[in-house]
Amino acid sequence: MEFNLNSKELEKLLSKVIPAVPTRTPMAILENFLFKIEEGNLTVFSTDLEISLRSSIQIKTEEEIKIVVPAHLLYDVVRTLNDTQIKFETEANSKLKLTTDNGIYNIGYSSPEEFPPIPKVIEENQIIINGKALKKAIDLTSFAMSKEEMRPAMTGTLLEFTNEGLNFVTTDGHRLVKYTNKKIKKPEKEQVIIPERAINVLSKLLTENEIKTTFSKTNISFSIDDVVFISRLIAEKYPAYNSVIPLENETELKINKSEILSSVRRMSLFSTTNTKQVKFSIKENSLVIEAEDIDSGSSAKEQIKCEYNGDPMDIGFNTAYVLDILNHLNDEEIVFKLHTPTKACIIEPTNKKEDEELMLLLMPVRLNG
Amino acid sequence: MEFNLNSKELEKLLSKVIPAVPTRTPMAILENFLFKIEEGNLTVFSTDLEISLRSSIQIKTEEEIKIVVPAHLLYDVVRTLNDTQIKFETEANSKLKLTTDNGIYNIGYSSPEEFPPIPKVIEENQIIINGKALKKAIDLTSFAMSKEEMRPAMTGTLLEFTNEGLNFVTTDGHRLVKYTNKKIKKPEKEQVIIPERAINVLSKLLTENEIKTTFSKTNISFSIDDVVFISRLIAEKYPAYNSVIPLENETELKINKSEILSSVRRMSLFSTTNTKQVKFSIKENSLVIEAEDIDSGSSAKEQIKCEYNGDPMDIGFNTAYVLDILNHLNDEEIVFKLHTPTKACIIEPTNKKEDEELMLLLMPVRLNG
């Protein structure tokens, strides 16, 4: 077998496929690319069994071959080469030989039998999603996925297709994020849960272009420009999150986001390491935020202007969760919708957008003393 | 005690002193700043017992006090505050109280008795060094300090003051770097060895200004703008490095640095992990570089144009050491001065500078087979 490829073109191709190659795996075969040459096309596959990537390039050859090549070695060689022509040849001793003007590189390859099959997604469901819109949804919601393996559904991101829009939902039991893009509609209601690693890789692959999304009960695929990304779905039922969202939170605290973020950041320096507790004391025009580290005897208290329409209330939160939420909001004014100090609090931007909805839910913590 | 300070001025002061605060130490007292107020000056000290930093600021108070304050807590609070006036007060219960327009912060302080004494450097030897020149010398040499605690002298950087210039020398036994700044002269020959951590901190503190450098047998101090940096010296004799530098290396290999760097980088992908060996086969107009990974059966060979005035020679190196050296040379053309495949090789820029000299020495490795 023999074909020629430009180093920069090949680098571009491999850079798209390498994210699915696992860095540490007991299955050494997964540290390879599967190279398939068929009908004048070189297709490169990678997988870690949960996610897989593939991309193709046209080459001039009439041969057909399938080989398995060390992914990082090949990618690292190709990306450190200057812009040059590379001649690829397979040698009798299971060596892939790369020849450039100045160098010869022999890389051992193996046969493709052991390489896991790349799943095919049955085109049961298909929908076009804009890449930029998908990226935005992931950026706003992915931080709240659970790290606890005990409840597998919550370790992923729920995509809930409805005829009113596409909901992205994440929760770890302490906070919940629901983002709706009302422009992406589907006549039948469908649910898929995408694992965290797939969400992270997807987020980096996305461009501003339209993405053909296809899913079955077990897999989802995204066609992003000339790359196909497939992920296993989490085959679990997502918790009935709507029942957690309170409807009676009539009391509203409107506040400047940068001010409260900066203040909670300072409070996190003072809050006791294991509880991370911060206390909000809310009155008509002022929010007093307090934290205390009992071990070191240090404490802090700040006052911020706000608008509040309820009776004075003291409510406690975990600083880490408040910071996470505030750090993921891009709006300048936000509203905390409250009911009582033991009931879930809802945080939203005050400035509503036409085709989107964002709601963050945060569970309070019981105040000491 | 009471005084006022602007948050941004205090942040600037603390940022200069915090680098000497250890992040992990069994001596909890070292995680503090020593605050000394005397004659209308607030001086802040920090030390990890090896290095220490101090800087001062004028304040309006007639009181005198010495207290020990948690360094990271204070610094983190101050740097997250907007530009604001801070009122400092000491309270009866060993609390330092900071008050701003919007907040009150109480930080527990302790008495200064346990804080280690900051060494005073007897002004035996004094010399002015330009900050930019010192930074350049550190950048060129620091990478070759040894990590082996067995020979303490080699874990630091040797500063050798002579009446022909100031030598900076580092070595780990596999390679040696000697950089001379001929403009910094001292009538009497003096040697000091500065520990690695001090070199790293010093490198970050240096500005372009002149630096008053004072040293005794045990300590060295650098006055950098309004900061005083003191380091313990390594009280050992530095190895007689001059006896290692070969004088008979008459054979010269001139080569483009970027080309050889890029090639050795690719070879490092192929060289066996434990030996990291790369082979240079040198002929009149061409250098052939080869590496092989026996375990995976992969290999690579590249050819680079060069100028060479000796008999053909094969010589082996450790790719990691070659890369380290090439990465620290800023020149476009370099020369390898060789004798035999088992003798030390000297690497130098071909373009000599008037007031500087740079020499890198690299030990070859025995070639397999």
Image (tube, coloured by chain):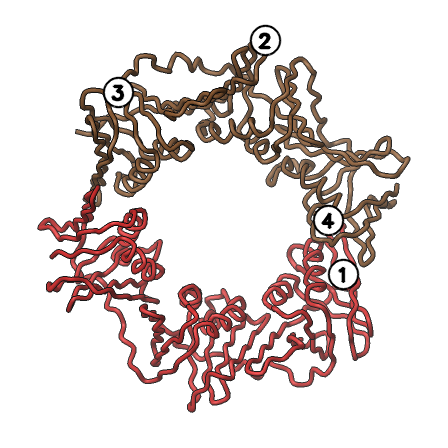
Chain colours: A red, B brown
Whole-Å distance between the Cαs marked 4 and 3? 58 Å
Q: Are marks 4 and 1 on the same chain?
A: no
Q: Which class describes the residues within 10 Å of circle 3: few (<14), some (14-19), or many (20+)?
A: some
Give percent across and percent down for residue B80: 70, 53
Q: Where is residue A151 in the image (x, y as percent from the top left)?
A: 47, 71
Tag 3's secondary structure? loop
* Residue B207 disc label: none
Residue B213 in the image: x percent, y percent?
64, 21
- Residue tagged by mark 2? B187
Q: Distance between the residues labelled 4 and 2?
A: 46 Å
Q: Which mark is residue A290?
A: 1
User: Could you tell me how far apart the alpha carbons at marks 3 and 1 are, in whole angstroms?
Assistant: 69 Å
User: Which badge, 4 or 3, comes first in the chain's sequence?
Assistant: 4
Inspect the image, locate mark 3, and give the three-letter code of the amino acid beneath it: Thr
For the residues carrying marks 4 and 1, which lies nearer the camera in this image? 4
Where, quadrant-wise, is the C terminus of chain A in this rendering? bottom right
The residue tagged 4 is B78
Splitting the image into 4 quarters, where does residue A317 fall? bottom right
Give the chain of mark 3.
B
The answer as to whether the residues below labels 1 and 2 share one chain is: no
Q: What element carries label 4?
A: helix
Q: Distance between the residues labelled 1 and 2?
A: 62 Å
Amino acid, disc 2: Pro
